[in-house]
Amino acid sequence: MELLDGKAVSKQLRNELAEEVKIMVAAGRRPPHLAVILVGKNAASETYVNAKVKACKEAGYESSLLHFPPEISQEMLLHGIDELNENEDLDGFIVQLPLPSHIDDKTVIERILPAKDVDGFHPINVGKMALGLDAFISATPGGIVELLKRYKIETEGKHCVVLGRSNIVGGPMSILMRRNTYPGNCTVTIAHSRTKNIKEVCKTADILIAAIGKPDYVTADMVKEGAVVIDVGINRVDDDTRERGYRLTGDVKFDEVSKKSSFITPVPGGVGPMTIAYLLNNAMIAARKRD
């Protein structure tokens, strides 16, 4: 078993981007500028946003944080998005999800210009990705693909089972893994909460990508010997033995599954760091296109 060390690979990618920033600045160009819209006081969202802002600073990017109160109207939020769309000094921005219940996620996402949608959630970017055209790929699936590539994981002709069908991870991940490219060219199955015989389906996977949002859901009896296992989940589980009162665990029961897998991502330190690094990568792609 070998760990797919997302922390190490993300550092490598971020260092490469930082070097590119230095070249840009030395040539008289401004560095990439990424903005984040945060609504309300969701603790997890604030943690993610702070990590993104910190990563921007370390890579030499400019970053802006727009923090709106939870009671902001949808109309006012859309007005803020319009201002960012029109800001020529901004390469890309994201709206941190989830949003308060009175705001429609889809309306917000569709308001972002596709050229500035570095989260890759706009329908135009999703559609272009599905067709294999130039588009922003959402950060978590993009980060996973980058991780597989840097570890030279063989994917062609392999059976990839994606456990979970969300528009953020499962859906785009299934598209990326079946595309005629590397990593890709897999035979892909999507399994989810309504899949019958889900254990047997998962056990056929050469590559298993777990993004179902249930702690320790994937157990050893669901995994083929020698499978590559990507754990996208990050769940808080109560744990009185920890000072903070909880521990983080993925969707995969790591202690069991790691004994059967050829490669596996840890939680934390696997997919999470790659998500942030790939967001920076998308912002750099946007910056390259401005000239």
Image (spheres, rainbow, N blue to C red):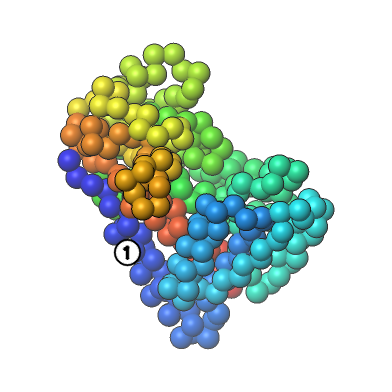
User: Is label 1 in a helix, a strand or a loop?
Assistant: helix
Please name whichever residue, 197 or 246, is drawn nearer the observer in this view of the structure: 246
Residue drawn at 50 percent across, 18 percent down: 194
Quarter of the image where the C terminus is located: bottom right
Whether residue 81 can be seen here = no
Q: From the top left corner, tell me how far across and down residue 228 is, in percent.
A: 27, 36
Horizontal side, residue 14 vs residue 168: left or right? left
Residue 275 makes an appearance in the image: yes
The residue closer to the viewer here, 134 or 244, is 244
- In which quadrant of the rendered image does the N terminus lie? top left
Question: Where is 111 relative to 26, above or below?
Answer: above
Mark 1 Cα-neighbour bin, 10 Å: few <14, some 14–19, many ≥20: few
Residue 41: x %, y % from top left: 62, 56
The residue at the far right in this view is 75
Q: Position of residue 111 (x, y in %)?
A: 73, 51
In the rendered image, which residue does mark 1 sit on?
12
- Amino acid on which the number 1 mark rests in the picture: Gln
**Residue positioned 70% across, 65% down in the render:** 84
Q: Residue at x 71, y 49 (%)?
A: 108
- Left or right of 149? Residue 126 is right
